[in-house]
Image: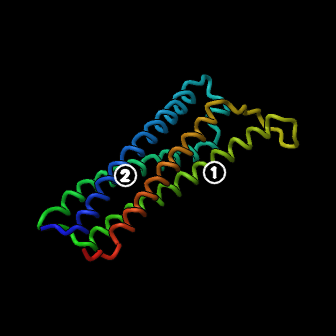
Amino acid sequence: MTSANVLKVSSALKLWGWVGFWVQVVLSIISGIILLVFVGTRSLSTPPSAEAVNPATLPGIGFAWLGLGMVGVSIFWHWRYTRWAKRLTYEDRPTKQQTIQLVKAGIVISLMGMLLTLLGAGAIVGALTAKSLQQQPTVITVTTLPVQPIDFFVIQANINIILSHFFGLISCLWLLQKVADKPSRE
């Protein structure tokens, strides 16, 4: 017989596992498409211009891809919550401590992904700031690297990735609170 508290935890894991899964899938698909378009437009520029190989943008895009990869891990982790919820209804179910460790690992995944993506966003914004300063007559005189609309889409992709990790973090913290709650006496 499964207790009411275990059923509540199982229900929360299932609900927030699926909600986190789908929110992150949608945001990561949008971000992935934007980043692929960015890479495609840069690789199609012939001859390779300074803009196509802007060294300040490369680390930012790299970190954005790493952040997107971490969203993939977080998506898998949220799917795993739904499988874990089913296991909680069996007689041979995982312990409360094992469930807490599972949710804490999800928190670490989201925080690591957020950090990587924030580093990428910082590098991209820095590169675009340098580009915008070079468009106006200033003391810095380097080849003009015009800011283009695709550059703003890359910022949007980074924001979507950060939002995805943020939502994953919020769902993990909510689950941690539900799992770690003291059982109610009914």
Q: What amino acid is found at the position of numbered circle 2 in the picture? A: Val
- Look at mark 1 in the image and give the residue it sits on: 122
Residue at the image position 27 percent from the left and 70 percent from the top: 98
- The local secondary structure at tag 2 comes to helix
Q: Residues within 10 Å of mark 2 (few under 14, many from 20)?
A: some
Could you tell me residue 24's position as x and y percent?
Answer: 42, 46
Measure the alpha-carbon separation of dots 1 and 2. Answer: 22 Å
Q: Which mark is residue 73?
A: 2
| Residue 161 left/right relative to 85 | right
Could you tell me residue 23's position as x and y percent?
Answer: 42, 45
Quadrant containing the N terminus is bottom left
Could you tell me residue 12's position as x and y percent?
Answer: 32, 59
What is the basis of the colouring in this image? rainbow
Residue at the image position 79 percent from the left and 38 percent from the top: 134
| Residue 132 left/right relative to 151 | right
Residue 105 appears in the figure: no
Residue 54 appears in the figure: yes
Q: Residues within 10 Å of mark 1 (few under 14, many from 20)?
A: some
Instruction: Give the quadrant of residue 182.
Output: bottom left
Query: Of the residues under marks 1 and 2, which one precedes in the sequence?
Result: 2
Quadrant containing the C terminus is bottom left
Please identify the residue farthest to the top as the structure is shown: 46
Q: With respect to residue 29, does 69 lie above or below?
A: below
- The local secondary structure at tag 1 comes to helix
Q: Which mark is residue 8?
A: none
| Residue 111 left/right relative to 125 | left
